[in-house]
Amino acid sequence: MTDSTPKKSTGYQVDVSALEQTVAKLNAVAAELGPTADRAAYQTTIGTGTLGTGFEGATGLLGTHDTMQSWIAEMVGQLQNFIEEYGGQTKQVAANYSDLETQTTEDMYR
């Protein structure tokens, strides 16, 4: 037996505080990435000759290190861009919903 009674819609609800918490967390990660990017780019260098000279292994390891250093710096940069873009969008969505809730409340009491 099915219930044919129409269901009353509860509307929609957006947890604005959860969106704001997400923005705060993204900002915290972004703040940590700054020093990480600098460390990856500038504080992990291996000078020529540090690993020895005159054998292929030292040259190969140095080349591999430089490749990884560049890759890590690029990945951190991409992550920073992602956080900046989507953190900003999330912040805007939270502000929009908050404004909408305020406007709806005001409209109800007019």
Image (spheres, rainbow, N blue to C red):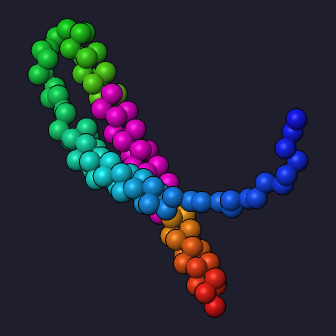
Q: Is residue 69 above or below residue 100?
A: above
- Tell me where the magenta segment starts and ends, as one range: 68-92
Give the percent coordinates (x, y) of residue 17: 44, 60
User: What's the residue at 24%, 9% (across, down)?
Assistant: 57
- The answer to whether residue 74 is left or right of residue 88 is left
Q: Residue at x 20, y 14 (%)?
A: 58
Residue 81 in sight in this render: no
Question: Does residue 38 belong to the magenta stretch?
Answer: no
Q: Residue 73, image x and y in percent?
A: 33, 39
Q: On the rendered structure, is 62 left or right of 68?
A: left
Quadrant placement of the C terminus: bottom right
Is residue 67 among the parts visible in the rendering?
Answer: yes
Q: Quadrant of the N terminus?
A: top right
Q: Main secondary structure of the magenta part?
A: helix
Left or right side of 43 for 104: right
Q: Residue furthest front?
A: 1
* Front position in the image: 109 or 13: 109
| Identity of the residue drawn at 62% across and 78% down | 104
- Residue drawn at the location 74% of the way across and 59% of the way down: 9
The front one of 66 and 96 is 96
Most foreground residue, 7 or 97: 7
Seen from this angle, which residue lies furthest bottom? 110
Residue 6 at what x, y percent from top left?
84, 54
The image quadrant that residue 12 belongs to is bottom right
Residue 91 lies in magenta, yes or no? yes
Decide which of 50, 19 is in the foreground and name it.
19
Question: How many labels sit on residues?
Answer: 0
- The answer to which quarter of the image holds residue 59 is top left
